[in-house]
Every structure is written in C-alpha cells, then in structure tokens.
Amino acid sequence: MKKTLRWLCLLLCCLLLALPGRAADTAAAPSLADTISQLQAQYGLTAENFSICYYNTVTKERYSFSADRWMIAASTYKLPLNLYYYEQEAAGAIDPETWIAGRRLSEIHYESIVNSNNDLSEALIYHLGTFRQYKEKMFASFSHLAPEEIADIAWTGNYYTTGFLCDTLQYLYENADRFPQLLTYLKEAQPEAYFKKYVTQYPIAHKYGSFDGAENDVGIVYTEEPYLLAVYTYGLSDGEEVVARVNEAVCRYNTEKATRASAAAREAARLAKLAADEQRFAQADREPAEAPQLTPQPAYLQDLSPIRLGALLALGAAAGLLLWQLVHHRRKRAMHS
C-alpha cells in the first residue's frame, strides 16, 4: 500500500511539471521594455521627447528610458519642494504655521500640491534663498548625483530628470510614516487625469505638471506590489494622453506580473508538499515493519511435547464426541417416554 501511494505522488508531480499552459504563459509574458517599445512606436516617442523611470517597491525591479535626460519639470518640481519643507517641519527647523507670502506654510502645502498654485510655490522657493540655493537643497536631499554630474541648465532653470523624481518618490515611500499629510494631498490631486485617467482601481499619490509643451506626472501607484513612476514628455500633440496610457500599460504589466508570481509561489509550495510527502513515504518504506505481538502460551502448555499435545487434543476430541452422544441419547429417550 505504501509503495502504491509513493508511485502515485511521483506520477502526479510529473504530470504537474509537464503541463504546457503555465510555461507557455510565462514565456509569452512581455517585458516592461517590450511594453514601452510598443507605446513608443504608437506615439512616436523618442529619447528627445519622452523619459520614464519605474521602480517596483516589492521586487526592486527598475526600468528606465532616457531617465537621465534633463527636461522641463513643469509643476512636478513641487513634489521635492514640499517634501523638503515637510522634512524641515518634522525636524523642528521650521514651524508649519510660519507665514510666507501672506499665507501659513500649512495652507501653502495644500495650495501647492492639490491646486498646483504657482505663485505660492515660487514663494516657497525663494524663502529658501536664491534659485541656486533652492536647487542645491533639492539635489542634496534627494539626488544620488554629485554636483558635477548635474547639468548647468538644471541649476538655472526648472529642469529635472525622471531619475531624480524616482529617487524623490522612493525617499517619500520609504519614509511614508513621516509624511502622511503630503501623501494625503498627493492622493487628492487631479483625480481624473494623467496617471489617474485610466487607472482608477488603485490609490495614486501623484504630482502632475503641464507647461510650455511639457506634460508630466510622477507618483506612487498602490497596487499589490506598489510602484513608483515618473513620466516626462515634451512637444507631443497629446502628451497628457500619452502619460495616461503609459501608466495604464505599466499598471497592467505590474499587476499581471504580480499575479503570475503569486501563482508560481502557490505552485512551488504545492510541489514542495508533494516532494515532502514522497520523502515521508520513502522513509516509511525503509523502516522495518514491527513484528506482530504474539500472545504467549499458558505455562501448562509450554512444557508439553508435540506427542503429548497431540494426545491431549485427541483425548479432548473423544471426550467431546462422548458428551454429544450422551446428550443425543437422553433427548431420544425423552421423546419416547
């Protein structure tokens, strides 16, 4: 019986491994590079007019295209700017009730992030000093680049890279417990456009931007495996639509890959259990079976020789026959009396 169960488990393992469907699905799944390439072909996206940086916070997968290109940031600059102020507030370096440009800093955060108010955001910039000093603080706080690696245009104008914004988003995500108000405002911003136009089933904390041919968005998309995404475009006929379609495609890639990974993990666990069962059955086959426990003979039988035992059995049989005849004879007499 045990050998039969063992061979049955081995046969089931072979059948599971031989199933063609899952292997074919995994092989056919497109990479993120393939997905973005299709969009590039569809919308005419090049290294000059398109930049993207993607980071999966769970698997640590990273993808980028032209992510080190300095492009017009538009209002996405308000994300690192407000994040810097929130950090200073948390450190006690500045009071959130400080008045700047006739408004409390706590009020300016909302106007800058949710309503994308340009005048109040610029007031935050120059409250830090000169434009150069503001940029120095941004790069020192959120960039991995050395000062000499930063292009001149970035020091004098509103230019960032999607790589820099991905670094900023990662800092925000990994320290989310310190910036709950900022994340709340980012989730309120622009509810039906840019990243949120086609991806409505997941919360998105983002800061969009539109200025002089630039259509951008950067944010955190809270799927099963949350991801960071920064997309910059320039000079496109419908840049906002491109940004929305890019996030739609990235979200589909992210969630489908997470689903496949979950299915693969479940399958691996099941095969591991089968292997463990096989090992247990094999171990049971190798262990010697216990000898049956025999009831010991009574003491009076242990000393009898085979001849004496046979004679005793014959005597018992004869006595039994005699007793039967006696009983039968008495019954017969009773019937005739």
Image (tube, helix red, strand yellow):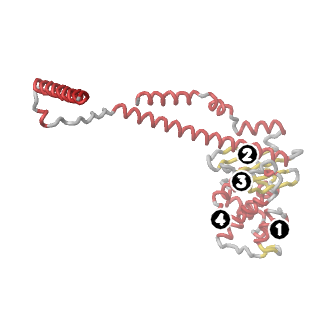
Q: Which residue is mark 1?
A: 120
Q: CA distance from mark 2 to mark 3?
A: 11 Å
- Which three-letter amino acid code belongs to the residue tagged 4? Arg
**Which quadrant is home to the N terminus?**
top left
Q: Residue at coordinates 78% horizontally, 57% vertically from top-left?
A: 207
Q: CA distance from mark 4 to mark 1?
A: 23 Å
Q: Quadrant of residue 105?
A: bottom right
Q: CA distance from mark 4 to mark 2?
A: 26 Å
For the residue carrying disc 4, how many other residues have a C-alpha within 10 Å: few (<14), some (14-19), or many (20+)?
Answer: some
- Which three-letter amino acid code belongs to the residue tagged 1? Leu
Q: Looking at the image, is mark 4 or mark 1 nearer the viewer?
A: 4
Q: Which badge, 2 or 3, is on the more N-terminal residue?
A: 3
Dot 2: element: helix
Q: Looking at the image, is mark 2 or mark 3 nearer the viewer?
A: 2
Residue contact at pointers 4 and 1, CB within 8 angstroms: no
Q: Looking at the image, is mark 4 or mark 2 nearer the viewer?
A: 2
Check residue 174 in the rendering and tell me which mark sits there, or answer none: none
Q: Looking at the image, is mark 1 or mark 2 nearer the viewer?
A: 2
Q: Which residue is mark 3?
A: 220
Q: Is residue 157 visible?
A: no
Residue 325, how many percent across, how many down? 19, 26
